[in-house]
Image: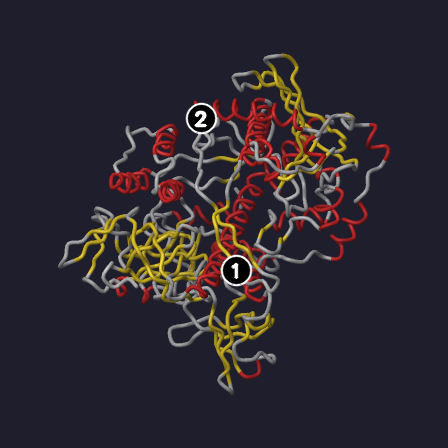
């Protein structure tokens, strides 16, 4: 039996009493040089959260009944919640006095001191910090002469970082800085740190977004070795062309946004007969250039995905690849992975083939131009667009067929507006408006969806190690809460065992109504977060039995990994040894890229919130109508027509004393009995913004006090 298992077996016995490491060495008869290795094993077990040292430095086994391991979700008021690693467990409330020195996102062990009861969460105390998450903290430097403090941008880090005079490193008062923590907090002292980077003043161009990049520790530079590799491989060799299906004579083109620089998907269409469409989806063959042994691959995996931050992109791959040899630019040869699908008029893929191919895109089309043409807008169009007008008409017909098929099986279409934030030449937000998802965007989405499903189903039945994009069924408690909100609008979910069709039905019923955007957002929050998994599971939101990500290998590592598996399969190189290795590494890769995706989403959302707050800073005193988007125990959030959301705090509802009726999800005036619910239209005035917290404050106006 391995020594790890022997240690756990010993500690599992009723007779075991907590021991020091030296006592464990004696019990197991460890001698001489083996002691260091034994201590490493103890440390390893502790990091894995299987054992823990108590206050006397004695080792005990983690008792899952009384203890829990997870990440701290901190609140600016000093308390926090443990988000358990075991997803079957509920969050645990940690009072300020029980936080110890734990900070936001630290990995900790919590001792449960009070069980959950009567709708209240369990309570716990932090007894061990396994991993620190905030080694580097981004914030604003406040200089106090002989010392200073860094005020964290992230208000979940509720400690200011003390900076001794010797650790200022020429930082000036009011500058955005990075502080590296050198001493962690205790009961009486703030954490202590040293200034390692100075980003600049907040009013300097790009400092605000750069601070968010630093806060999320997003790697925004490639190593010299990775850049050299990118330059070295950025070419097509004649020998490679011979090994591929030559599709350069096929009418293939790309459709993207007007500002796009990396084009990783192109499409083609033809009618085989009256009842059969032949759709070609051609994806940049990034796996040909980026091999698992390369530094490029290590850095791409570290990033997991590209991150889009309004006026800049942190790419997964260097520009030589992402905007160069891997981008399907028009009128140049490019190596691709092509999926050719024969689809009938019911939207069913009757046959498909996957090729390692070479293409030459005939046109670089823009979404808005294609949408205008399809919708019959009278204007001048680029010649290259008119040359493929017939193909676009066929594509539109196929798009509607595929969309209808998806709808019939219950796929949920989230059609709520996204934000478009316009920045000026200095990086300042000058406009915020709805971003319309037009017909050309929908068309490409449908083609990518059917391609991803086709690939996933093919490799599922081949029983090959794979990465799936899965979306689990929603949490019943969240569904119950969502149903309460729906009731306020006159809707309801029916049945106990919910099918995606029930959520789809709600989406259709709210279409075109004033509450559409709000309910769509609440519906999205009710569902689980889609993620990557090496284990097969259906995609609930799409009502798809099989789904993966194959179509964006320039910007998503999942797709790059999928391409490698497919390439090995096509080239007959997927040996039993490789399959065994894949089964070992894919679960870890799937977890990692799911985490980097969440991180990117949070960073992108933070940038959007920051720039919306910046834009509304110029609107102080202005009045708007909006819809209540959520209600809380401290006020209500109101969303304006342009997608901006702000808080009306109870203190700014001056006509009455209001309280939150949690059971009915509404706000009630104590004297007037006036009720506010999600979806109600209200009039507000903008009264303040906070660019550090990225928040906007409104006050509620009654007709009597409105200007």
Residue count near mark 2 (Cα–Cα under 10 Å), binned few <14, some 14–19, many ≥20: some
Residue at image mark 2: 407
Quarter occupied by residue 106: bottom left
Quarter occupied by residue 123: bottom left
Q: In the figure, 138 relative to 297: above or below?
A: below
Residue positioned 49% across, 49% down in the render: 419
Quarter occupied by residue 699: bottom left
Residue at image mark 1: 430
User: In the image, which disc is placed on residue 19?
Assistant: none
Residue 544, position as x, y percentages in the image: 48, 28
Q: Earlier in the sequence, mark 1 or mark 2?
A: 2
Q: In the figure, 454 relative to 707: above or below?
A: above
Identify which residue, 582 or 672, lies in the foreground.
672
Q: In the figure, 376 relative to 429: above or below?
A: above
**Secondary-structure class at tag 1:** strand
Identify which residue, 410 or 285, lies in the foreground.
410
Q: Is residue 591 left or right of residue 690?
A: right
Identify which residue, 357 or 593, lies in the foreground.
357
Residue lying farthest to the left in this orientation = 671
Residue positioned 77% across, 31% down in the render: 358
Q: Nearer the viewer, mark 1 or mark 2?
A: 1
């Amino acid at each position: 039996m391995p020594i790890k298992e022997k240690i756990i077996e010993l500690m599992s016995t009723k007779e075991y009493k907590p021991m020091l490491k030296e006592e464990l060495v004696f019990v197991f008869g460890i001698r001489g040089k083996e002691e260091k290795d034994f201590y490493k094993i103890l440390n390893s077990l502790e990091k894995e959260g299987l054992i823990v040292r108590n206050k006397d430095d004695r080792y005990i086994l983690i008792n899952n009944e009384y203890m829990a391991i997870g990440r701290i979700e901190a609140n600016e008021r000093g308390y926090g919640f443990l988000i358990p690693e075991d997803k079957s467990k509920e969050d645990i409330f940690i009072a300020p006095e029980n936080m110890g020195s734990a900070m936001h996102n630290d990995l900790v062990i919590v001792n449960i001191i009070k069980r959950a009861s009567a709708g209240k969460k369990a309570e716990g105390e932090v007894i061990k910090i396994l991993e620190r998450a905030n080694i580097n903290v981004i914030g604003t430097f406040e200089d106090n002469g002989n010392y200073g403090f860094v005020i964290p941008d992230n208000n979940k880090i509720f400690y200011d970082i003390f900076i001794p005079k010797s650790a200022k490193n020429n930082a000036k008062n009011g500058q955005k800085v990075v502080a590296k923590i050198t001493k962690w907090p205790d009961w009486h002292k703030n954490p202590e740190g040293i200034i390692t980077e100075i980003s600049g003043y907040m009013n300097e161009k790009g400092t605000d977004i750069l601070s968010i990049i630093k806060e999320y520790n997003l790697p925004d530079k490639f190593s010299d070795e990775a850049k050299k590799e990118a330059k070295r491989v950025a070419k097509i060799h004649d020998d490679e062309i011979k090994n591929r299906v030559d599709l350069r004579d096929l009418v293939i083109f790309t459709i993207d946004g007007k500002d796009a620089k990396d084009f990783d998907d192109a499409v083609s269409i033809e009618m085989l007969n009256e009842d059969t469409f032949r759709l070609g989806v051609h994806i940049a063959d990034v796996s040909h250039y980026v091999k698992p042994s390369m530094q490029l691959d290590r850095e791409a995996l570290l990033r997991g995905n590209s991150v889009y931050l309004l006026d800049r992109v942190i790419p997964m791959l260097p520009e030589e690849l992402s905007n160069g040899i891997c981008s399907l630019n028009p009128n140049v040869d490019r190596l691709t992975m092509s999926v050719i699908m024969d689809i009938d008029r019911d939207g069913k893929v009757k046959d498909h083939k996957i090729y390692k191919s070479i293409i030459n895109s005939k046109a670089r089309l823009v979404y808005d131009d294609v949408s205008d043409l399809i919708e019959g807008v009278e204007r001048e169009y680029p010649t290259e667009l008119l040359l493929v007008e017939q193909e676009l008409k066929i594509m539109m017909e196929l798009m509607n067929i595929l969309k209808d098929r998806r709808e019939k099986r219950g796929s949920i279409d989230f059609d709520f507006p996204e934000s478009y934030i316009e920045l000026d030449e200095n990086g300042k937000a000058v406009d915020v408006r709805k971003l319309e998802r037009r017909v050309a965007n929908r068309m490409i989405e449908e083609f990518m969806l059917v391609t991803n499903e086709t690939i996933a189903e093919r490799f599922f039945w081949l029983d090959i190690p794979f990465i799936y994009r899965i979306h689990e069924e929603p949490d019943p408690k969240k569904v119950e809460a969502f149903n309460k909100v729906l009731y306020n609008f006159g809707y309801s979910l029916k049945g106990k065992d919910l099918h995606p069709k029930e959520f789809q039905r709600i989406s259709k019923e709210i279409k075109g109504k004033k509450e559409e955007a709000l309910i769509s957002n609440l519906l999205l929050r009710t569902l689980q977060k889609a993620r990557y998994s090496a284990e097969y599971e259906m995609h609930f939101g799409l009502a798809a039995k099989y789904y993966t990500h194959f179509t964006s290998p320039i910007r998503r590592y999942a797709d790059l990994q999928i391409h490698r598996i497919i390439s090995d399969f096509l080239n007959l190189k997927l040996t039993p040894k490789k399959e065994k290795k894949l089964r070992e590494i894919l679960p870890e890769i799937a977890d990692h890229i799911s985490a980097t995706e969440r991180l990117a989403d949070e960073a992108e959302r933070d940038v959007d919130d920051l720039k919306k707050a910046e834009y509304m800073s110029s609107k102080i005193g202005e009045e708007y109508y909006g819809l209540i988007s959520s209600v809380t125990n401290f006020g209500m959030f109101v969303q304006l027509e342009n997608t901006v959301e702000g808080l009306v705090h109870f203190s700014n509802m001056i006509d009455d004393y209001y309280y939150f009726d949690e059971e009915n999800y509404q706000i009630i005036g104590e004297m007037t009995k006036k009720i506010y619910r999600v979806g109600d239209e209200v009039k507000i005035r903008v009264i303040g913004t906070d660019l550090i917290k990225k928040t906007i404050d409104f006050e509620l106006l009654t007709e009597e006090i409105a200007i």
